[in-house]
Image (cartoon, rainbow, N blue to C red):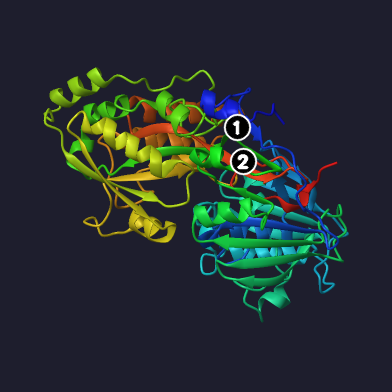
Amino acid sequence: MANEIDRRHFLGAGALVFGSSLFMTAARAQQSVGSENSTLRVGVVGPTLASIDPNTTLRTGSQSLVWAIYSRLTYLDEAGQVKPSLATSWERESPTVWVFKLDPEVSFENGVALDADVVVWNLRHIFDPTTAPSPALRWRASIDSVTKVDTRTIRIVTKQPILQLPNYLATVFFQEPGWAASHKPTSQALGSGPYRLETFVNEQQATLVRSNTYRGPKPVFDKIVVNGYASEATRLNALRNHEIDATLTINPSNFPSLLSVPGLKIGGEPGQRIQTLQFNFNRKPFQDIRVRQALNYAIDRESITKSVYKGTTSPNRTQVISRFYSGYDPDATVWGYDPEKSARLLTEAGYSKGFTVNVNVPSQTYAGAELAIQIIKQEWAKLGVTLDISVLPSGPWGDLNTTSDLAKAPDLIYWGIQNANLDSLENLRSWKSDYRDNDGVLPNHTEFDTLLNQAANAITDDEQLSLVRQANGWLRDNAALIYLWDQPQTYAYSDQLKWSPRYDDWFDYINIGKAG
């Protein structure tokens, strides 16, 4: 990891940035991690520790549990590269035909082999429109068939090319069919991974213990206790009191207070998620490109990333994908700060006296968001634009974002764009005209839809990546969103741990070890 700095240097300089990451450590002291029972204690945001159904949960705390309990064909490593898991290899036989070879040594805790029959049953269940869970809805329609070739081989045929299919399969986990028929996977689990579920209390606590039947690399810790906390304050107090050993998603404004805690490593670096403000194009002001441009020019991103985020991230380069996605353009420019141009554009659009809009922001979801939006409110107020802010729990926030009641839909959504598969097209689809029915479309939106349709049917990676960049260019040219910054992955953990936090919001428990 990067250089260490102390409290005096951090507070004096605001933040010191080394390369693309910020790393700090408090004074070294002994902290108990990995005692005789070898237990790792982790703190997460309580509401993210919800249903543990492997193929329906979208909550980060639960998904981290799923990763440790169940098997999948592929996985994405710490650099975002697709790697073999249950599938030892795969081959694209034609633009629409894939063949996957399976590890012959994998079985569930009850002794049932995780073979081709089980994989086919799971995939058919997920792709069936009558049973498919929501995460599969957007791409299941492109699957034509899933068949068994032999005990250790399956074939997947798609209706159109899916160049990122191995990436998608990294988030499809396999249940034992007989067990699934008689149990509740939302709160119970029987898997084939390195850990098994011992206890689960919704939004409060989950306990994992090392599986005796797992044939892969042995995890370092015998037991993992995951505690859910209702607020960041209580979660960080647990960290200060050494009740937990690690946590993610910390507002950087809390870094200074953690530097006084002995034996903690604290830091952050740009992650895969892009923080944005999304327009509701049904609202009259946002139908004018000059208004959309003006609001972009009125945000001092450089100042906010330094003051709020303490140098752990940088302004977004006007694209809705980060450096972890294919098609990312490192040479794209940042939307500049020009309040005079903002005022001029609003006057030209007929809004010299401004207007009032509202925005919904999810609480404890995007690090720094609740403070950053207050600064944006102040900057827009200089133009006469009043921003009414509602900070909501993630559940109600999500419900209002997708409501079909246009009167209840917010004017703006504070949204962190990402997808667990690192599929550029999935991020871009958030602006497709048929993505939601409550945020309207732009007059020339068919141009963007056409680019995405062409990209989805591309035969080669080069063809698709070219179209991805064109689609990002269309969003930029039409000021179709307000670009903010890459969300930093912020963390704090005991210096008795050996750990490199991932680019996303999840704990990969099998890759957390003991220092020394």
Question: What residue sits 51% from the left and 31% below the top?
Answer: 310
250 up-or-down from 33: above or below = above
Q: Report whether residue 340 is seen.
A: yes
Confirm or deny contact between disc 1 and disc 2 (CB under 8 A): yes
Q: Nearer the viewer, residue 238 or 174?
A: 238
Residue sitting at the far bottom: 182
Residue placed at 45% from the left, 41% from the top? 368
Mark 1 is surrounded, within 10 Å at the Cα level, by few (under 14), some (14 to 19) or many (20 or more) other residues, namely: some
Alpha-carbon span between mark 1 and mark 2:
7 Å
User: In the rendered view, does 57 fall on the left or right side of 181?
Assistant: left
314 to 133, vertically: above or below = above
**Residue 32 rendering spot, x and y as whole percentages:** 77, 53
In the image, 205 versus 137, the foreground residue is 205
Q: Position of residue 4 (x, y in %)?
A: 69, 29
Q: Which of 351 and 23 lies nearest the eye of the viewer?
A: 23
The kind of residue tagged 2 is: Ser
**Along the viewing direction, whichever of 79 and 315 lies nearer the viewer:** 315
User: Residue 230 appears at what percent x and percent y?
Assistant: 50, 61
Against 211, residue 361 (above or below) is above
> At label 1, which amino acid type do we have?
Arg
Residue that numbered label 2 is attached to: 260
Q: Secondary structure at mark 1?
A: helix
Q: Secondary structure at mark 2?
A: loop
Quarter-of-image position of residue 115: bottom right
Mark number, residue 7: 1
* Residue 486 place in picture, x, y as percent: 50, 34
One can see residue 121 in this view: no
In the picture provided, is 192 more to the left or to the right than 78? right
Quadrant assignment for the C terminus:
top right
Sort mark 2 into few (<14), some (14-19) or many (20+) by Cα contacts within 10 Å: some
